[in-house]
Image (tube, rainbow, N blue to C red):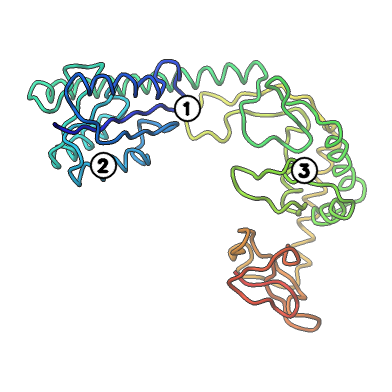
Amino acid sequence: MKRCAIYTRVSTEEQVERYSLEAQLEVLERWAGALGYEIADTYTDPGYSGAQEDRPGLARLLTDAREGCFSVVLVYRLDRLARKVRLAYDLIERLEAWGVGLMSYSEPNINTTTPIGKAVLGIMAVFAEWERDTFAERSRLGLRKAAQSGKYLGGIVPYGYTVEEGRLTPHPEEAVVVQQMFTWVAERGWSTDRVARELNRLGIPPKYRRDGRGVRGKRTAGVWRGGGVLRLLKNRTYIGEYTYGKRTRKTQPELVRVAVPPIVEPALFEAVQEQLSRNALFAARNARSAYMLKGLIRCGTCGRAYVGSADYYGAGDPPGLTHPLHALHLSPRAPERPGGGHLA
């Protein structure tokens, strides 16, 4: 009995009800039985785009195809395998070189084991790419419309806000902290490092330490630092000017201004920007040491960048680079220095 492989895929953007993995698998298993094939293995890629080749299930399928584990691959539709013409041809050429054919349940004419099936393949691949591009454009337009209505479309929620019913809403406790940070800089002229030290001294946790989670899958330090304070103080969301579309890689017709409840008065925000400019000027003027590798050497434990420190080795020793959180952990790959810290 001939052996076949079953490949299923669904992207996060697609309607799961239309192309659910379970439905694809059920149909293809019945089809394999009707064709008289023995199923060698099933391969699936949930949440992956058909425009990319870097998919774990697809990689495993290609490896097994090269080793001759089956003679044909069954898919529900061609666009489950690839949504780019060039990628579809490339994958099929590799399969053919290993003596493996491709058959599509929804498109009977796509059967690379027959000459006419190979001819129809090119036409269907073009339509699969066109459908993907059309769907992507509709999705972008839908997101822009949602943003124009005031919806928050994901990403890192700024400190001081929470998301309620799909919209950014001030977090009462955090909003008070944000206002205090702006006041410290505008009225007292504090530096961002000074603000961070005060927040840590008062025991005020950053958002992600309080929630017990990281940022984009990465662990956070759990303490305030000058760089984070600076980004917060420059974020115009706090005066109600949140803009959608700045981070997207796709070309946008125009940026979308989303209505957000402000936390800080515009006059206070501008006063802080002026003070930050003055602080930056004096910080550069008063710098006594230059650290060539500052920000380039990173901790082997948490990935944080090292910063310049005048007392790295101890009192009276020359300045060097140190880890801002060396008291919390040490890298297992380097010994501790007498003055604290370690090199990554």
Report, in whole angstroms, how far the alpha carbon at label 1 lies from the one at label 3: 29 Å
Q: Quadrant of the C terminus?
A: bottom right
The residue at 76%/32% (across/down) is 161
Report, in whole angstroms, how far the alpha carbon at label 1 lies from the one at label 2: 23 Å
Which residue, given by chain and number where applicable, does mark 1 sit on?
12
Tell me: residue 77, above or below residue 229: above
Q: Is residue 88 left or right of residue 198?
A: left
Label 2 packing within 10 angstroms: few (<14), some (14-19), many (20+): some
**Label 2 sits on what residue type?**
Leu
**Label 1 sits on what residue type?**
Thr
Quarter residue 246 falls in: top right
* Among numbered discs 1 and 3, the one appearing first in the sequence: 1
- Secondary structure of the residue carrying numbered label 3: helix
Which residue, given by chain and number where applicable, does mark 2 sit on?
62
* Among numbered discs 3 and 2, the one appearing first in the sequence: 2
Report, in whole angstroms, how far the alpha carbon at label 3 lies from the one at label 2: 44 Å
- Horizontal and vertical percent position of residue 331: 63, 68
User: In the current view of this chain or complex, which residue is farthest to the bottom?
Assistant: 316
The residue at 64%/50% (across/down) is 219
**Label 3 sits on what residue type?**
Arg
